[in-house]
Image (tube, rainbow, N blue to C red):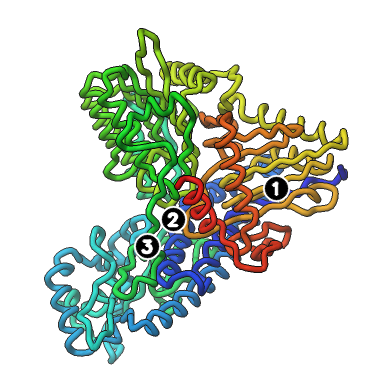
């Protein structure tokens, strides 16, 4: 290997290139129009979280001493400047795409009207709606030099309003109007001549500002939207106890008042108004991001379809899993062989059925499960509660530190405890990110274990849009070790010495490196050696350097990385044998898969962990081998299908240009469609 420094792309910059791939989906004219709007919403929501967490962290790091910056390997201020430059370009692209999509909607006889485009009848309809539904919820704050500037809420849209007189003799007055929360952002207006009309609540309020400020003697009212994104990271007491829940609840309240990280403002805002708000918020120039007329674009994920079916992706019926049935006992089936559920192509209902059966089966004595993110009306929780009511011993670890799901998880924790479920809040200093469930039955006087292990959460909502794998098994090699792990978790301990499972934080890194070393050894012997890794993110520097070492030894490495990727492929002396692709499509690619050639006896693993330092060293994660040869082949077939994608796969390269990947196929080959067809044929 060359003596030069290994190429490592900053993770924040890499993440922004990932979010640009989301924008590419919004730009793709083959994607249905409303789905393109949803990708704009996803881009916007992603960026909000990025500022709340990653940019907030970088801002903190700008205050550290130079020695610490050397250890970091980068200058936080320099990275913040790079981030701003990239984000401004992306916001421009975002705005152009929005305008383009609006025009295309109008070609489909769907019109998004603003407050300047309402005729008399639609104006009257809007005024009536405003007075009935909105006016009582709007209380403007008049800005007064004698009063402290109000604390703007995180990610809430405000209008900065300027009240003035045409004669210019009356002093200008400023006010803030907060958009009400908890109501739909969109109002469908009466249809005319088969033409559909939609207006945003933002523009309804703009149209009716004279009703809000009627008591003031002003004849000119200007209003421009702003949105503050605040630091969302929590400084918490590390003690995991009842006090932890209390501390977390208080910290969630503080989260709303974190330091402002970004001010998104309407570029149409006059400079005097912008200067006023910037000085009031005491922001620096790096925090100012020019936006468009509408902020909080994440709400557009619920954009109403008032038009044709072909404006959205057609919903696919979840496929059956050959051999499984909702009308047969799953335990008897799983006892005979392993089963794989490939989500969202196949139904999450099998997992619900597994838990529901466990809740009522007289032979079941215990259920152990780890929960990270849960659906709003969780069927998983309902099954666990019913199991407890039926006298089963239910042990449930709810990870209270699942970012942005903390409040929901506190609620579910309280519900479970009320129903007699034993709830474990986690392990001090570590997030429990594993997706594992173990059911114990007494069969002929002997304990027998049945397990479900997955790459994704026990969440029926995300299971409909996330690409994941979930394994049912009664193989004692796995279930016995899972039992050992749950015992350790119940004692709030970190355990090791697993022969089959791959468990963070103590064993994932050494086991991964041992598997890579085996491929290096094989390659040096002149034999075929390869590694295929699929994940959400690759940012751990030690792992990247290990992969560079393997590449230089002649190991063929193929990576499928949806999100951030700090590894730079194709660099001479480091990564000439590494190819990286990223697939962004209708479903969110969420599965973590490892494949190793292993001298012709291929090894395949599924995992909950990405190759990030936090997952390897600071979380409880579980990976597991696939021993069933039929399932192993199915996973390999799915991987091979993804590697043939020439429609939604992008190359990750040193240029970071997200170039669409070309393969040997002349015809379009879209892996998510091909996987559905493959599973349909195989499981029919």
Left-right relation of 331 to 173: right
Q: Which residue is mark 2?
A: 260
Alpha carbon distance from label 1 to label 3: 33 Å
Pointers 3 and 2 in contact (C-beta within 8 Å): no
Mark 1 or mark 2, whichever is nearer to me: 1
Q: Position of residue 387 (x, y in %)?
A: 26, 25
Residue 657 visible in this rendered orientation of the protein:
no
Mark 1 or mark 3, whichever is nearer to me: 1
Vertical side of 168 occupied by 455: above or below: above
At horizontal 60% and vertical 67% (from top left) the residue drawn is: 668
Q: Secondary structure at mark 1?
A: strand
Q: Secondary structure at mark 2?
A: strand
Q: Which residue is mark 1?
A: 558
Q: Residues within 10 Å of mark 2 (few under 14, many from 20)?
A: many
Q: Which residue is mark 3?
A: 301
Frontmost residue, 270 versus 253 = 253
At horizontal 52% and vertical 31% (from top left) the residue drawn is: 621
């Amino acid at each position: 290997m060359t003596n030069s420094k290994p190429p490592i792309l900053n993770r924040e910059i890499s993440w922004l290139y990932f979010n640009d791939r989301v924008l590419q989906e919004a730009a793709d004219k083959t994607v249905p129009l409303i789905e393109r709007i949803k990708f704009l919403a996803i881009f916007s929501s992603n960026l909000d979280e990025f500022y709340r967490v990653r940019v907030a962290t970088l801002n903190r790091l700008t205050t550290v001493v130079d020695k610490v910056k050397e250890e970091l390997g980068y200058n936080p201020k320099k990275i913040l400047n790079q981030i701003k430059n990239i984000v401004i370009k992306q916001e421009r692209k975002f705005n152009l795409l929005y305008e383009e999509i609006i025009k295309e909607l109008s070609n489909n006889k769907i019109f998004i009207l603003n407050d300047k485009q309402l005729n008399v009848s639609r104006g009257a309809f809007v005024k009536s709606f405003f007075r009935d539904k909105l006016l009582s919820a709007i209380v403007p704050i008049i800005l007064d030099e004698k009063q402290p500037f109000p604390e703007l809420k995180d990610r809430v849209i405000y209008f900065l309003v300027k009240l003035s007189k045409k004669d210019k003799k009356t002093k200008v007055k400023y006010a803030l109007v907060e958009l009400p929360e908890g109501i739909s952002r969109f109002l469908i207006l009466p249809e005319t001549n088969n033409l559909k009309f939609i207006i945003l609540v933002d523009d309804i309020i703009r149209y009716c500002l004279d009703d809000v400020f009627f008591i003031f003697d002003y004849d000119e009212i200007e209003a421009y939207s702003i949105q503050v994104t605040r630091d969302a990271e929590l400084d918490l007491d590390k003690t995991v106890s009842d006090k932890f829940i209390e501390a977390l609840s208080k910290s969630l309240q503080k989260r709303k008042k974190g330091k402002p990280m970004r001010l998104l403002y309407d570029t149409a805002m006059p400079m005097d108004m912008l200067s006023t708000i910037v000085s009031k918020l005491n922001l620096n120039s790096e925090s100012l991001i020019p936006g468009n007329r509408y902020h909080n674009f994440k709400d557009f994920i619920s954009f109403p379809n008032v038009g044709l079916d072909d404006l959205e992706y057609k919903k696919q019926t979840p496929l059956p899993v050959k051999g499984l049935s909702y009308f047969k006992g799953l335990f008897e089936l799983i006892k005979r062989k392993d089963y794989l559920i490939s989500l969202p192509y196949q139904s999450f209902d099998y997992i619900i059925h597994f838990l529901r059966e466990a809740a009522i089966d007289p032979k079941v004595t215990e259920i152990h499960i780890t929960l990270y993110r849960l659906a709003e009306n969780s069927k998983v929780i309902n099954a666990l509660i019913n199991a407890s009511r039926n006298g089963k011993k239910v042990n449930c670890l709810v990870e209270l530190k699942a970012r942005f799901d903390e409040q929901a998880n506190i609620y579910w924790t309280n519900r479970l405890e009320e129903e007699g479920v034993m709830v474990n809040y986690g392990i001090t200093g570590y997030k429990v990110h594993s997706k594992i469930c173990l059911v114990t039955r007494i069969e002929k006087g002997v304990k027998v274990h049945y397990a479900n292990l997955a790459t994704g959460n026990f969440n029926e909502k995300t299971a409909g849009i996330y690409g994941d794998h979930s394994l049912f098994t009664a193989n004692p090699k796995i279930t016995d070790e899972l039992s050992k792990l749950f015992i350790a978790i119940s004692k709030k301990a970190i355990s090791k010495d697993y022969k089959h499972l791959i468990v963070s934080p103590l064993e994932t890194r050494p086991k991964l490196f041992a598997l890579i070393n085996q491929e290096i050894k094989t390659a040096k012997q002149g034999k075929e050696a390869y590694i295929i890794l699929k994940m959400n993110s690759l940012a751990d520097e030690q792992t990247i350097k290990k992969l560079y070492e393997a590449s230089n030894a002649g190991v063929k490495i193929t990576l499928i990385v949806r999100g951030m990727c700090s590894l730079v492929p194709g660099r001479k002396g480091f990564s000439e044998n590494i190819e990286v692709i990223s697939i962004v499509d209708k479903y969110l690619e969420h599965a973590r898969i490892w494949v190793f050639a292993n001298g012709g006896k291929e090894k395949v693993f599924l995992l909950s962990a990405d190759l990030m330092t936090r997952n390897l060293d600071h979380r409880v994660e579980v990976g597991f081998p696939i021993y069933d040869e039929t399932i192993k082949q199915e996973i390999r077939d799915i991987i091979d299908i993804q590697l043939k994608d020439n429609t939604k796969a992008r190359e990750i390269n040193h240029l970071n240009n997200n170039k669409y990947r070309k393969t040997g196929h002349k015809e379009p080959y879209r892996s998510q469609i091909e996987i559905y067809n493959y599973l349909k044929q195989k499981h029919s």
